[in-house]
């Protein structure tokens, strides 16, 4: 009877345990494969997020470090990162070491996950993660063997139980195991299993506790791994309820109370109202659309509103869809970006204001390095050099030349940063043309004033005796009836007339005059002067030409300026040979930074002797035997009264030239 009972019990038990083992094996295999896929999926997301910044910065050392960190993840068989035209790959070798490889990845039998590497909303690369199910299959085979061994052990125990007290040796241990399994399945720690009555049950107890410990350890490992990751990780159901999350999600969302499993829905409690429609659209894309989506949204946290960049993917558990979400808190990054932009705008505005101020200074300013190489200059300096700033920067400061333009400069060079290792210099060009001209004019004015007072006084004293001599000659005119006396009287009158003209010119030279200038045409004035000298020109057979156009107008004291051209024309006629031409021409001229009208009076005579042009405007300098030497001195005085200049030179074709420059 015991043999029959034992055989029946063994057979039934073997069939039941075998069926349970098959179902458990298939269920565990499906569960382990699903878990492997989840782990690979989460690990791929984690790697894509972790690699974003190093790939963006092309930090190959950090990329390699992140890839090498996957050594301890046993399911990972290979990792490949493609970014910036570079491939980083790791693959297990025969010793299960994750080593660098440049060859192709053997993907047969591997589970593959591919993720884009995104930074700032821009795809900058991809990461491919390959996991192997061989470890799971090895574990399942070991579990299957363990289960077969267990069945055999149980069968042996059942046979032996016929000879033992069934309750003590079978029922009570099985009840304890069942109680422990139910407690563990319910999530409670369960009471520790007591010692069984047989070694076989002790081994069974040890195996069950080991399996429970392994499951708990794996769960704890997963939670720890997710909590270590700085990126946000969470799982939500279709209604937005959180079912799992990591420490980062808890801190950002303020979900400490979620540890007690109280419902909390992200759309109802956390999402900014203005962003809820966008988040809902992404949820629909994940659950009912293409299965993944990403967006930027604002969320309320205990510390205030946070900016998050979130991505999600669809996952099914038990036929129900869930959202596996990851994200980055970009609040500080956005604030930093906004502050950097504000600083850039402020710096740009300051640079514009500094440049405008620098360029608005009319004084040429150049900044050079210690060797005189131009680093920066203002618009006035570029204009002085006759080139653009781009052409001048990098060249030596001596390219800024000002020869031949009639201007004079005082150049000062000072250190840009005194008492500093930086030897940069600031070079300032001060135009002193007008100052020098004023100084020279003042010196001439002082000399002429002193001389004018002197000659004026002399002229007054001499004029009265000359008048007496002239009156006496007139009184004795009737008595001087002989030809000899009349000739002597004529000679005396001629000399008295000459002295009278000299006195008149001396009085004119020494007389201060207030000049009143009004704009007027220059050609009509010159035409009047030439008309008044037509008879004198006819006597010496000299042609006079007025080449000044009617558009030339200048501010002038017409009567004073008439005397200038009368004296200059008279001087030209006196030195022109018969049959020659005296030409007066005029045109606008930019000189020393000012607008002038340059009038040239040219004759075809012998010209000035060497050294004469520097003295022709000095009082009493004359080349004519009967000249007073005051005509051109009076010309210079009147021209300077008009803020102009006058100079003498010889023409290349022959003849003399008087050049008069008057402000336009």
Image (spheres, helix red, strand yellow):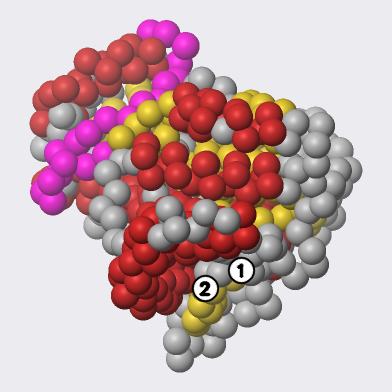
Residue at the farthest right position: 103
Residue 610: x and y, percent? 80, 67
Q: Say which element carries label 1.
A: loop
For the C terminus, which image quadrant? Answer: top left
Instruction: Look at the image and give the residue range highlighted in magenta.
Output: 287-309
Residue 203 placement (x, y as % from top left): 50, 58
Which label sits in the foreground, 1 or 2?
1
Residue at left 22%, top 15%?
Answer: 277
Where 121 sits versus 566, above or below? Answer: above
- The label shown at residue 410 is 2
Would you name the residue on which mark 1 appears?
A: 621
Query: In the image shown, does 140 or 528 lie closer to the viewer?
Result: 528
Cα–Cα gap, marks 1 and 2: 35 Å
* 334 with respect to 411 (left or right): left
Which of 389 and 628 lies nearest the eye of the viewer? Answer: 628
| Local secondary structure at mark 2 | strand
Q: Can you give x and y, in whole percent of width and height, for residue 382 in the image? A: 58, 52
| Residue at the extreme bottom | 419
Q: Is residue 368 visible?
A: yes
Residue at x-position 19% and y-position 36%: 299
Q: Which residue is the extreme one toward the top?
A: 288
Q: Name the residue located 49 percent from the left edge and 46 percent from the top edge.
A: 564
- Residue 229 appears left or right of 52: left
First of labels 1, 2 by sequence position = 2
Return the residue nearer the eye: 416 or 244. 416
290 magenta-colored: yes
């Amino acid at each position: 009877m015991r043999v029959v009972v034992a055989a029946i019990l063994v057979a039934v038990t073997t069939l039941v345990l075998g069926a349970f083992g098959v179902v458990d094996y298939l269920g565990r295999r499906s569960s382990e494969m699903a878990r492997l896929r989840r782990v690979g999926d989460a690990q791929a997301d984690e790697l894509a997020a972790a690699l974003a910044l190093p790939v963006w910065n092309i930090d190959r050392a950090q990329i390699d470090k992140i890839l090498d960190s996957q050594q301890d993840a046993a399911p990972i068989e290979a990792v490949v990162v493609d970014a910036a035209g570079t491939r980083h790959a790791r693959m297990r070798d025969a010793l299960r070491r994750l080593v660098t490889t440049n060859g192709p990845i053997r993907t047969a039998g591997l589970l593959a996950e591919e993720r884009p590497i995104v930074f700032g909303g821009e795809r900058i690369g991809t990461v491919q993660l390959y996991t192997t199910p061989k470890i799971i299959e090895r574990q399942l085979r070991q579990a299957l063997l363990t289960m077969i061994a267990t069945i055999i052990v149980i069968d042996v125990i059942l046979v032996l139980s016929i000879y033992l007290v069934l309750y003590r040796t079978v029922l009570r241990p099985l009840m304890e195991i069942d109680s422990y399994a139910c407690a563990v399945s319910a999530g409670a720690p369960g009471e520790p299993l007591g010692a069984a009555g047989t070694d076989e049950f002790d081994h069974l107890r040890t195996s069950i506790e080991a399996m429970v410990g392994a499951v708990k350890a794996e769960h704890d490992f997963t939670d720890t791994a997710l909590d270590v990751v700085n990126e946000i990780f969470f799982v939500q159901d279709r209604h937005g309820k959180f079912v799992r999350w990591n420490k980062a999600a808890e801190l950002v969302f303020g979900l400490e109370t979620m540890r007690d499993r109280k419902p909390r829905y992200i759309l109802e409690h956390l999402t900014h109202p203005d962003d809820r429609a966008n988040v809902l659209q992404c949820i629909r894309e994940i659950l009912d659309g293409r299965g993944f989506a990403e967006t930027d949204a604002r969320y309320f946290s205990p510390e205030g509103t946070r900016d998050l960049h979130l991505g999600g993917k669809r996952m099914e558990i038990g036929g129900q869809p869930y959202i596996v979400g990851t994200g980055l808190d970009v609040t500080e990054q956005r604030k930093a970006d906004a502050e950097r932009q504000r600083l850039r705008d402020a710096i740009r505005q300051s640079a514009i204001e500094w440049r405008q101020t620098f360029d608005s200074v009319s004084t040429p300013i150049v900044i050079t390095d210690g060797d005189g190489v131009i680093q920066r200059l203002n618009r006035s300096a570029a204009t002085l050099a006759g080139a653009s700033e781009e052409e001048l920067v990098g060249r030596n400061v001596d390219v800024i030349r000002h020869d031949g333009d009639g201007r004079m400069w005082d150049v000062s060079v000072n250190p840009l940063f005194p008492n500093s290792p930086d030897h940069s210099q600031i070079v300032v060009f001060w135009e002193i043309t007008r100052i020098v001209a004023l100084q020279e004019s003042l010196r001439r004015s002082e000399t002429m004033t002193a001389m004018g007072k002197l000659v004026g006084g002399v002229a007054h004293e001499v004029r009265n005796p000359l008048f007496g001599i002239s009156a006496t000659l007139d009184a004795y005119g009737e008595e001087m009836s002989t030809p000899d006396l009349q000739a002597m009287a004529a000679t005396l009158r001629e000399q008295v007339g000459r002295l009278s003209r000299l006195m008149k010119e001396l009085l004119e030279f020494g007389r201060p005059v207030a000049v009143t200038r009004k704009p007027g045409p220059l050609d009509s004035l010159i035409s009047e002067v030439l008309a008044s000298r037509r008879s004198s020109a006819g006597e010496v057979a000299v042609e006079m030409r007025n080449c000044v156009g009617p558009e030339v107008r200048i501010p002038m004291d017409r009567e004073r300026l008439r005397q200038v051209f009368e004296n200059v024309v008279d001087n030209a006629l006196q030195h022109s040979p018969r049959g020659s031409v005296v030409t007066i021409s005029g045109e606008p001229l930019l000189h020393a930074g000012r607008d002038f009208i340059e009038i040239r009076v040219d004759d075809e005579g012998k010209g000035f002797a060497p050294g004469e042009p520097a003295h022709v405007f000095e009082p009493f300098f004359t080349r004519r035997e009967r000249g007073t030497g005051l005509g051109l001195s009076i010309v210079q005085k009147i021209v300077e009264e008009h803020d102009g200049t006058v100079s003498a030179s010889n023409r290349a074709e022959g003849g003399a030239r008087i050049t008069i420059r008057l402000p336009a």
